[in-house]
Amino acid sequence: MSNFSTILSLSLSLPLCSTLLTPLQAQNTAPRTSRPATTMSNRPTAQPAASANTSDILTRYQNALDQIAQGRFLEARALLQAGLKSYGNAPELNLLLGYLLEREGRINEAREVLSRVAAQSPAAAAYVTSLQGKRDVPRTAPHPPVEPAVSLTRGLSLKAIRLETTDQRLAKLERTMAQMVNAERAKLNLTPLLFDDELAAVGRAHSAEMRDLNYFSHDSPTRGLTAPLDRYRAAFNRTPRLVAENIYRVWGTQHRLGEEDIRAGHTALMNSPGHRANILLPNATRIGIGIVVNANGDIWLTQMFDRP
């Protein structure tokens, strides 16, 4: 039996492993004897939180960097503005937002944002000084708002966003892998993740698209569903506080998928630093796993983690 697998890790300070949803991207291939194909991505996103902490601020910052790396400046600004509703005094978020506002020619707003943290951040204070004498750049039309998540579903079939399982054997294996994830988290006294059927349906749809369109990536070719965050927002019509994704692919299994294959996939993900980091995200609260196969026994698997 011959086997082939790949590992892809995304993050950016987001790793796209980049390793933040990993904000973006490294890939290598190896025989299965060494390691199955996987991809990891962690893209936390902004939403009010009960208490501010350095880890949450960092993931929000990383997620915004991920968007910037992909040229999605409006999305990055929206994420930062949402994050500042919870962490208004975070220098990192204010500095990055100030840069985006200046880039758009919104100098007065940039100056206001940076001034909030100028007393505690020498970099912000120097940035405010550098803006002296600059004026807003006139805009001929109102600045385009970030489209609401619901707009992402225009022209998209429900199957492209969510795919319900029709195979109870695969559904059982999805939950078996979730139990393996929680066993790893228990070793570090991390809160167990709740298995969410809707989150699993979103991951399953991405697994099926990778199979049917013959690609292996966090980035979908379907307009409106490009990144994990896009797919999440299209499915749930909201921006989560955190979302991360691992993907895994194995060729040439040549046999009926079973628990041994799932355990091998879990081991491969845990042996990859980026994927392991997603599995052990301290702030994640839910997990969804979507598995699909083809007639040859090839496997496509997507793990999604979130904190609504």
Image: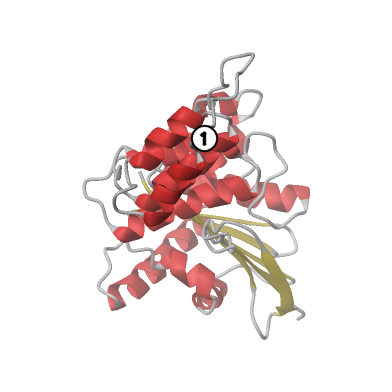
> In the drawing, does residue 292 fall left or right of residue 275?
right
Q: Secondary structure at mark 1?
A: helix
Residue at 56%, 15% in the rendered image: 142
Colour treatment of the image: secondary structure
Three-letter amino acid code at the position of disc 1 = Leu
Report the quarter where the C terminus lies.
top left
Categorize mark 1 by other alpha carbons within 10 Å: few (<14), some (14-19), many (20+).
many
Place of residue 16 in the rendered image (x, y in percent of width and height, measured from the top left) = 58, 59
Q: Can residue 197 be spotted in the picture?
A: no
Residue at figure coordinates x 45%, y 43% from the top left: 129
Q: Is residue 265 left or right of residue 59?
A: right
Q: Which residue is mark 1?
A: 101
Residue 85 lies in quadrant: top left
Q: Nearer the viewer, residue 35 or 93?
A: 93
The percent position of residue 230, horizontal first and vertical second, equals 56, 39
Residue 168 falls left or right of residue 103 = left
